[in-house]
Amino acid sequence: MSLNYTKKTISHFLHPQNLGNIKDADARASVGNMVCGDQLAFSIKVRDGIIKDIKFLSFGCASNIATASVLTQKVKGATIEKAKNLDWQKIVKELGGLPNQKVHCSILAVEGLKQVISEYEAGHPTVEVKAKKIVKTTKVVKKTIKSKVKKTK
């Protein structure tokens, strides 16, 4: 069986962009497809809400490598919010299409991106999240003080 890969897909497979691992990454995540056996691992470096660097490692087919390569190119330099909204169909379009039986590779790449962003956000709460925690803590402290004041009266 012959797969009709585009020249761009073959180029990304043979010369993947952002291949590797970031040593001092802000977050890491791995995803896999149990049916086909493909696996991807992502590492990112974020500064001021912008993905400054993203790299991937792959154990998979040409489509797996090509889609991860395109994905990393698209989100490098983008805000976290913009990267969260990347759709697998944009990756397929960027490659000029994929054989139907290989489209799942683009979905896996996007799942990996969302997972590494989720890992990053879990370890690096935004100012808004921090502010909510401060407000909640302040309410607990005020409630505790009020109950202690009542007990001393």
Image (cartoon, helix red, strand yellow):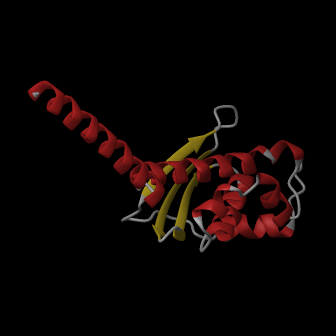
**Residue 144's spot in the image, x, y percent?**
22, 34
Q: Nearer the viewer, residue 23 or 132?
A: 132
Q: Nearer the viewer, residue 62 or 107?
A: 107
Looking at the image, the residue that sits furthest to the front is 153
Please give the name of the residue rendered at 74% of the width and 54% of the height, measured from the top-left corner. 63
Which quadrant, please, contains the N terminus?
Answer: top right
Query: How many numbered circles are shown?
Result: 0
Please give the name of the residue rendered at 80% of the width and 46% of the height, measured from the top-left corner. 102
Please give the name of the residue rendered at 76% of the width and 54% of the height, measured from the top-left corner. 87
**Residue 19's spot in the image, x, y percent?**
56, 66
- Left or right, 21 with reference to 143: right
Q: Nearer the viewer, residue 90 or 18?
A: 90
**Residue 131's spot in the image, x, y percent?**
41, 54
Please give the name of the residue rendered at 89% of the width and 50% of the height, measured from the top-left corner. 2
Q: Is residue 2 above or below residue 96?
A: above
Looking at the image, the residue that sits furthest to the top is 151
- Left or right, 41 with reference to 89: left
Residue 71 falls in image quadrant: bottom right
Looking at the image, the residue that sits furthest to the left is 152
Q: Is residue 100 above or below residue 83?
A: above
Which quadrant, please, contains the C terminus?
Answer: top left
**Residue 145's spot in the image, x, y percent?**
20, 37
